[in-house]
Every structure is written in structure tokens, then in C-alpha cells.
Image: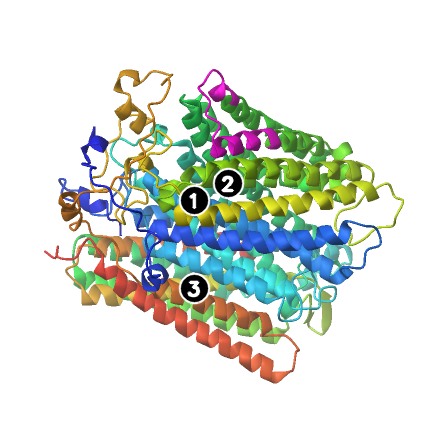
Amino acid sequence: MAIAEHKLTSVSPATAYSGSFPWRTWLATVDHKKIGIIYIVSAFVFFLLGGIEAMLMRVQLGTPNNTFLSADVYNQLFTMHATTMIFLMIMPMNVGIGNYVVPLMIGARDMAFPRLNAMSIWLFLGGGLLLYMSFLTGGAPNGGWFAYAPLTQVQYSPTAGMDYWILGLGLTGIASIAGALNFIVTVLNMRAPGMSINRMPLFVWMNLVVSFLIIFAFPTFTVGSIELLFDRQFGGAFFNPAQGGDAMRWQHLFWFFGHPEVYILILPVMGMISEILPVFSRKPIFGYSFVAFSGVGIGFLGFIVWAHHMFGVGMGPMANAFFAAASMVIAIPTGVKIFNWIATMWAGDVRLTTAMLYAIGFISMFIIGGISGITLASPPIDLQQTDSYYVVAHLHYVLFGGSILGLFAGGYYWFPKMTGRMLNERIGKIQFWIMLISFNVTFFPMHFVGTEGMPRRIYTYEAGMGWDMWNFVETVGSFFLAFSILVFIYNVIISLRSGEVASNDPWDAATLEWTIPSPPPSYNFLHIPVVNSRRPLWDAKYPHAAGDDHHGESSAPSLVRYEYTDEDTAGAKEIHMPSLTFSPMILSGGLTIAALGFIYINKDILGLPTRMAALGFILIGIVMVSVAIRGWIVDSRKDSPYLGQHH
Amino acid sequence: MSATSHAHHDEAGQAPLVGSLGVDSRKLGLWAFIGSETLFFTALITTHLIFYARTKAELTASGMFAHLDPKHFLGINLTSVLAAILLASSLTMVLALAASKAKEWQKFRFWLLATIILGSSFVLGQAYEFTHLYEEGLKLAPQFVFEGETVKSLFGVTFFTMTGFHGLHVTLGVVWLIAVYFKVRKFAASPENPMDVELVGLYWHFVDLVWVAIFTLIYLI
């Protein structure tokens, strides 16, 4: 067993977060683990920003006829809240954890294209910062996260906000496609010997499925937003019915992307749950193939249901019937997964750690969101509920109750691997219960006010509509929800400082990332492991139970922190890892600056000077991109495996 | 590019970047990228077709279509020549790849240069076509003037957007071809050259294929 080869003996204190911040090794990094951490930290910062936007909206809606926010600011806030949470929080958080964990799980030393990986993170950050710059330059985007035409045409959204939205999301879109290509190649081509497709951990499976969703879904969004940009900047009229355009065309282009997008948000989290439940139930996942292939099924069906977001526009009975039926079919693979998760816990030795609590919370809340989803898949019901708070309740049950609770499960589970410290379990459990209860207090009443007719996206309402009490309850709940996030931040800070030191394998887990030190060395594996089963580490630890379905009570997890010995690491010097390079960052910076130029290239603000400045930005951007491409080629030649092989 | 590949490349006959799927990583990535690009062009082309059908219906109803058929704007002669040029460049690309695999660098440089020249000719031809159309009145605007009459149609908008993005892809392809040309000239003996050539060839054929679709759907049908 190759994974048992490591001589793991000496003990040393956690080193990852002590000492001064070695900025160069982070800014020029191509290490998938560091890139993953940058993703996670920046996504968390955007999570806080999106949360603050949500809190401002909840304060405004807490009482009727409130004047805390103006209608315009409220429009900006709900647009930016959704855009942030979807594109700048859940997606990059998934990508960040995937970036860190997927190569470890398949026994690889890095992603297939480390420099492209670095480009993705900086481009994502550039796009996010560009979006947030709009608050300082005359108004954030205010047309809603699905930016329906013709509201987004320049005569109805005259500020530059929507242009920031188009180009900011354009940059994060390029980052996502590049990242997805990287995941596809990594998963297909970088697996350790023996790690066949049907032995891959389910988290890896789901990342593969999601990567295909990204590369096939994002292009139509790109085309839609380019066309919208042409409408706004160059008099295009693609989506302007007054000039012969077609507003429905935007809806089709957007939702052909937008619906797969919601699976892009949830499937990686389902993968995390499928890793966590078996470990804390002391049983292998029930029905591995069913869980894997139902993920593939959800991904496939996700492409033929987009118009269920458009029942309200009147597509006719045939289209409605088709999209309703296709949408309901998705309940089957989703239900398969849920039953498999429950069956995994069934008769297992369930250990209720914080990660496990969050995983169970995910299943419970996702079922509620799934059921309201089925009701919305039915056109007659949808026509009653569309654009009401019932939809807001549904989407928060699947995205917060689903994705975000699942991400907390993944966070508690992999935090020891990433930092070398355990998160405090006691605080974690308290935080879980505050979050779960306050989440339900905040969002469950939205079902009621929705069915009582409260429209979404209104900045205030009259007293006496029957919505007052529940809106107040929701606002109170949201404060406790925000408090639970603060508790989490407190937990992270004290755990990083003085948390229990994590061993290689604190959870007695089954997959390859737990065979190496916490945090892993830059090269991950001293020797590339050879894999013989779906749960290589369990089989190594419990050879008598290998192939058996039940692993019984775990031995006490070791609390010793292992490092490679000097003798081992002497061998590691021969492992060549890709060199540090700033080129991906310069390239991303150049694209971001050019995008800023594109926003103002045809705007009549201050006349000629603005256009000249915009043109200057575009030129600077092009120069930076050119310089970076050259630097990229030079730097990549340093690591070329072909060097020294000239015949 | 991969570190793990070092562990593999001593094994008999395996190329250094070949991974667990038995394919070069860059090639696999490019194929996935081409899959993504297919959706990109599908969205652009369907946008054009939807609005074209609408224009046709409206103009036919008012009895103007025969006179104002958007194809009248598009010299089929010029674009046929452009199509022939681009298809020929696919042939020279194939010959360049074959030469690079046979390590006949002299021949390779000849065929790659031919591809570069043909590709650039296409870009120049398209630039000429765009200028010509613009002068005739076709603009990136929801109406244009043809023979003194104002036509309300998104034809110009969708046409320029779609063919413009194709032209951009061809231009980037030419830049990539030139980069490979100089790289191979500098590192003639490098064993990675055939894969470099294969990658740019793959992209080049894809861009040609998109043109075949655009040419058929817009100029022929």
C-alpha cells in the first residue's frame, strides 16, 4: 500500500500561519492550495459584503412605510446582494475548496495548469473589485441579478452600473471557464495510478460535472452580456423591442445559463456532503454509483429546464408543459441523492461533529427548498407565486439552507487540513444551532407573506397588508443570522491562534488528502500514491474490513501532528514544482483595467477627456496583457518537462 | 506543465505531458475549450438567424424583401473567395503538422507561413468587406439605408456582431500561428514542437469550421 510508505514520525508546531506574511510567495503563487485559500478568503469577504447588503434591506423592510433606504439604493442593494452571493461568494467558495481539495483527493501534486489557475483567481478578484467599484462611481447595477431587458437598456438604467455588471461578470466568467477547463483536465488526466473514474471521491465527481456545466453554460451568458453591452454602448437594440429587438431573447440567453448556474452552485456542495456523511457515520456512502450518476443526471437535465423561470411571460401551453415536466423530472435524481445520504447515516455510528450537524442541516433545509421548488415547477402555481416572496423563500432555502450550510460543513471538515488547526467544536455547535434556527426564522415566514401576495423587490409596503408582523420577525431573525456569522469569525480567529493542533487525519477519514500532513507540503505527496479502492485510507487503516460495508467504531483519532522526516524531505528536493510567476496576475490586472476602459469608452460623461482616459485604460490594459503573455511563456519554459531532452 | 508527469515520463515511450487519460493535457484542455466555444458561436448564430427570419417576414409582408434582400449587401463573390482562402488554410495547416511530425522543418516553415498568409488574407478581406458594407449603409444600428430607403432591421447589428467575433477569433489564430512559427524557428530541435503545432492546428480548424457554418447559413441559404 503506497500510502503507508510515508515515514511520519517527528512532531513540530504548526508553521503555516506563524511569522511574517511572505507576500511574494502568495501573490506570485501557482500552488493550488494557496490559490484555493485566496479564493476562500476573498469569497468570505464578499460573503460579508453581500450579508451587509442583505441586512440593510432587512432593516428597510422590518417596518411598513420605512424611509431608511431610498427606492434607488434598495434596487442597487438587491441587485448587488444576489450578484455577490452567486458570483462572488458561493461559486468562488466552491472553486476555492475544490482547488484545495480535488488535487489532494486524486493524488496529484497540483492542478493541470497551475499558471492558468493563478490567472483565474486574480481575474475573479479583478471582476469582483470592478463590480464593487460601481458603488463609488455613480451607482451600482440596479436591474436585478437576472438583468431583464428592456429595464437594462440605457434609457431605463442610465448610470454606468449595468456596464460594470456586464464587464465585471465578464471577467469572473472568463475566470470560471478557465477554472473549469483546469478542473476537467486535472480530474481526467492527473489521477494517481489506480484512481480510476469509478473510484474517484464523489466530491471530485461533482466538480467534474460542474466544470462541464460551466463551460457549456457560461458562453450563452457571455454572448447575452456582449449583446447587452452593444445595446448600451453602441446603439445595438438586440433586446430593445421599441427598435425591433426582442426582450425574450435576453431571457432565453440568460436562463440557458442561469439555470445550470444554480446546479453549479449546489452540486459541489452535494459532493462535500457525500464525503462528510460517510466519515461521520462510519460507513461507506450508500449507492456510490447512484449518487455519482444522479449528479450527472442533474447536470444534464439542468440544461433543458431553463424556461421554467419564464412561465410568467406567457410562452404558451406546449412550452410550459415541456419545461414543467422536465423540471419535475429533476426531482428524481435529487431524491435519489437524498435517500442515499439518509441510507448512509442509517444504522451507522453517527458522530455529531459540527461538520456532520451542518451536513444534516443541509439535507433538511434542502428538502424544504426542493419541495417548494416542485410547487414552482407547476405553471399554474408558479403564475400565482412568481415574483413574490414565496420565490425568495424557495431560493434562500436551496442556496442558503442548501449551498451555504453545506459550505460550512465543508469548511469545518477541511479547516484542519488547510490550516493545521481544528476549529473549536463547542463554539461550532453553538454557531450551528443559532444559524439553523435564525435561518428558519428569517426565511420561513417569506413563504407566508409570499402567498399573501407580497411582491419581491419592493423597497417598502403599506401597513395593514397582513405582512407587517412576519416582516418584522424576518428582520429579527436576520440579526441572529448575522450574529452567527460573527460567532464563526470569532471561532476562526481563536482557532487559528490557539486551536487544537490537527493531526494528518483528525476525523478518521477515508480519502487521500488525510494521508499527508496538515497543512500539506507544497508538493502534497512525497510519493504518488497507488490506489486500490474507493476509500484508500480506510482500507489501509482497517485492512480486516476492506471491502466490507461497515467499519465499526473508530479507534481514537490520533492527536499527534505528523511531519515528513528530514530523510523524507531530502527526497522531496527532487520534486520539481512550477516556479513563482507574476505573469498571471499582470494579465488579469491588464484585462481588468481594459474592462474599466470599455465601460467609459462611449459614455457622455465629461465629454472627450473621459473617452481619452477610457482609451488610455484600454491601451494600458493591452500592453499589460502583452507583457504578461510574454512573461508567461518565458516562465512556463522554466518548468517545461521537455527541457534538457533535446535530441 | 504537471509535476506528476515527471514520475511518468521515464516509462517507455510515453510523451511527458500524457496523463491518466492517455491524452496530452493541453490537448484535452483545448478540446474542452472548443466545446465551450461551440456554445458561444451557437448563441451568436442563433441570435442572427432569429432576427433574420423576423426581418424577412416583415419585409416580405410589405413586399420589399425581394428588393431589399440583405444578401444584396453581401457580395457573395468576395465571401466565396474568402471561404476558399480559409478552407485552403486548413489544408496548409494539415501539411504543416505532417511536416512537423516528420521533423522536416524546412517544409514545415513553408506550410505554416502559407497558413499565416492565407489567414491574414482572410482577415484583410473581411476588413475590406466590413468597410464596403458600412459605406453602403449597413451599420451597427437597428436601421440602415439601402438605395435611399430606410430599412428597419437588426440585420446589421447581428451580422457585424457574429462575423466580427469570428474575425476576432481568426485574428487571434493568426497571432498564435506567428508565435508558433517563431518558437519553432528558435527551438527547432525541441520535442514539444509537434504538440505546439497540433494545438494551434486544432484551434485553426475549429475557427474554419465556424466559418463554414456562418457562410452556409448567411450567404448560401
Could you tell me which residue is drawn at 30 percent across and 17 percent down? A545
Task: Identify whether B88 is placed above or below A179.
Answer: below
Crowd rating for badge 2 (residues with CA inside 10 Å; few <14, some 14–19, many 20+):
many
Nearer the camera: disc 3 or disc 1 = 1
The span from disc 2 to disc 1 (Cα, nearest Å) is 9 Å
Residue bearing the label numbered 2: A407
Q: Earlier in the sequence, mark 3 or mark 1?
A: 1
CB-based contact (under 8 Å), mark 2 and mark 1: yes
The magenta segment is A342-365
The span from disc 2 to disc 3 (Cα, nearest Å) is 27 Å
Could you tell me which residue is drawn at 66 percent across and 29 percent down? A371
- State which chain disc 2 sits on: A
Task: Give the camera-side residue of A207 and B17.
Answer: A207
Q: Is residue A341 left or right of residue A366?
A: left
Same chain shared by disc 2 and disc 1: yes
Residue bearing the label numbered 3: A588
Amino acid tagged 3: Ser
Q: Is residue A115 left or right of residue B60?
A: left
Whether the magenta-drawn stretch holds residue A348 is answered as yes
Task: Identify whether B114 is placed above or below A12.
Answer: below
Q: Is residue A367 left or right of residue B113?
A: right
The reply to whether residue A572 is visible in this rendering is yes
Amino acid tagged 1: Ile
x%, y% of residue A400? 60, 41
The span from disc 3 to disc 1 (Cα, nearest Å) is 21 Å
